[in-house]
Amino acid sequence: MDWKNVFILYVYCLVMFGHVCYVESQGYDDAQTLLTYLFTAYDKSIRPIDKQTDAVNVTVDFNLLSVNDVNELSGALKTTGFLDVKWNDTSLNWTWNGDANTLSFYHWPQNEVWKPDLTLKNSFLNYKSLGDSSLLVENNYTGEMTWHPFQVFESTCSFDITYFPFDIQNCDLIFTSWSYTKTQLNLQVGTNGLNLAYYEANSDWDLKSVSWSSSEGADETSVTFSIKIKRKPLYVLVTIVLPIIFLCILDLFTFVLPCSSGEKIGYSMIVFLSFAIFLTIASTTLPQSSESTAIMTIFVILQTAASMVIVIVSVLLVRINNFSKSTRIPCPIIATMRVLKCRVCNTKVDTSDSGSIDSDGEEVPFTWKDVADMIDIFCFLLFAGALALSTLICLNMASVGI
Ligand SMILES: *[C@@H]1O[C@H](CO)[C@@H](O)[C@H](O)[C@H]1NC(C)=O
Ligand SMILES: *[C@@H]1O[C@H](CO)[C@@H](O)[C@H](O)[C@H]1NC(C)=O
Ligand SMILES: *[C@@H]1O[C@H](CO)[C@@H](O)[C@H](O)[C@H]1NC(C)=O
Ligand SMILES: *[C@@H]1O[C@H](CO)[C@@H](O)[C@H](O)[C@H]1NC(C)=O
């Protein structure tokens, strides 16, 4: 064998085997060569790190796309988003000469390469591995792997609805590696954290702020992405609070109807029934949770109770109105009425037109009808004051969180 042949053989070897780890162009063949080169000795069950006692560093960023649904009753938050999961695979690297015409990265199906068994730790549904078999993992020539599992996440969240509809809720999405311990896999938040670049606003909830953190548990490392959302109160105020206040105002006018008209009880009863029917309709909008009671629910119950009291008072008023003249008006009532009449009208009590003689023969300037009228005015003012006060206090207490 002369030196010329050895040289030709050398060049041949260089061309044939040299390009195995040196992808020259972007042809179909080159991709096939790269595949053969990378995956002949590759096993996706082996953690991609030289020293198998070291932990693989995995960074996670979360891109929130939307907040879909908040379910206070079941305590579930539905969000759509995708993760940027990054790690370095020491086997999936090749030399790249910097030429844009050659392959510097490639995409492999996610089930062909090693990937962390990430899962949503506080998932509302059953355990489910992230991603889908149709997703691809990007493989940079340096061995950097990037995976973007896209998902509708349903996470548990404990809602505090005390301040409904001005409530602010804090919810976490906690991701962890289900099987690997912290000595095998080190999960950390990446450089972007919780990214809102793709966020679409929700019609019922405002996104107030976001935060993220990496934490180390006894066995595993996990990353937490927190979102703070605030309910938009307008819908509830317009569809629940305003109608209830309207009904309460209608209810007040029970006391404007004279007892003799015979409509008083019927009117107050109709308003009470409207309350009952309205509450049946509104109960789907009011938050349903037995953990905490919303101030708004207490407000609604108070107004319903007031409406019931108004029915009872009107029945009693009609009864008082119909007391016979021979029934004695108790002295305290007469005294109160005297004082009130003098104070309010600042006139002398006129005794000439109506009056009754009590059992002692003393002339009494008032009839039971006057008493009923006085109670009407008193109740109108009392319930109007109570309505204004309770509305103010409840709204003020509920909006404490804003
Ligand atoms: C993983 O990250 C830690 C610090 O965050 C570093 O000390 C360690 O060398 C990294 N491991 C690898 C394999 O890069
Ligand atoms: C992967 O390696 C590159 C270069 O050494 C480093 O900058 C990057 O932080 C590593 N990525 C992870 C997730 O450890
Ligand atoms: C791939 O990475 C390993 C470990 O970092 C290194 O020893 C090897 O030389 C790299 N291979 C290529 C072709 O760059
Ligand atoms: C591959 O990694 C190199 C070095 O980290 C980086 O400059 C380049 O942008 C990466 N390419 C892709 C497609 O991610």
Image: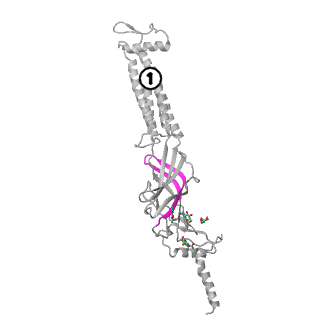
Q: Read off the magenta span.
A: 54-83
From the top left corner, tell me how far across and down residue 64 is, in percent: 54, 53
Can you identify the residue that label 1 sits on?
379
From the top left corner, tell me how far across and down residue 397 is, in percent: 48, 35
> Residue at position x 46%, y 30% from top?
390
Q: Main secondary structure of the magenta part?
A: strand
Q: Which residue, as the protein is rendered here, is positioned at the far left?
A: 359
Q: Residue 177 lies in magenta, yes or no? A: no
Q: How many marks?
A: 1
Q: Which residue, as the protein is rendered here, is positioned at the far bottom?
A: 1
From the top left corner, tell me how far across and down residue 110 is, in percent: 51, 66
When the figure is inspected, residue 21 is found, relative to residue 285, above or below; the finding is below
Q: Quadrant location of residue 33?
A: bottom right
Amino acid type indicated by mark 1: Cys
When the figure is inspected, residue 393 is found, relative to residue 203, above or below; the finding is above
When the figure is inspected, residue 117 is found, relative to residue 358, above or below; the finding is below
| Viewer-side residue, 113 vs 126 | 113
Horizontally, residue 37 falls left or right of residue 330, namely right
Q: Quadrant location of residue 333?
A: top left
| Viewer-side residue, 61 vs 338 | 61
From the top left corner, tell me how far across and down residue 250 is, in percent: 48, 28
Q: Residue 66 lies in magenta, yes or no? A: yes
Horizontally, residue 169 falls left or right of residue 14, namely left
| Viewer-side residue, 295 vs 210 | 210
> Residue at position x 43%, y 20% from top?
375
Q: Quadrant of the N terminus?
A: bottom right
> Residue at position x 38%, y 15% from top?
332
Secondary element under disc 1, as helix, strand or loop, is helix
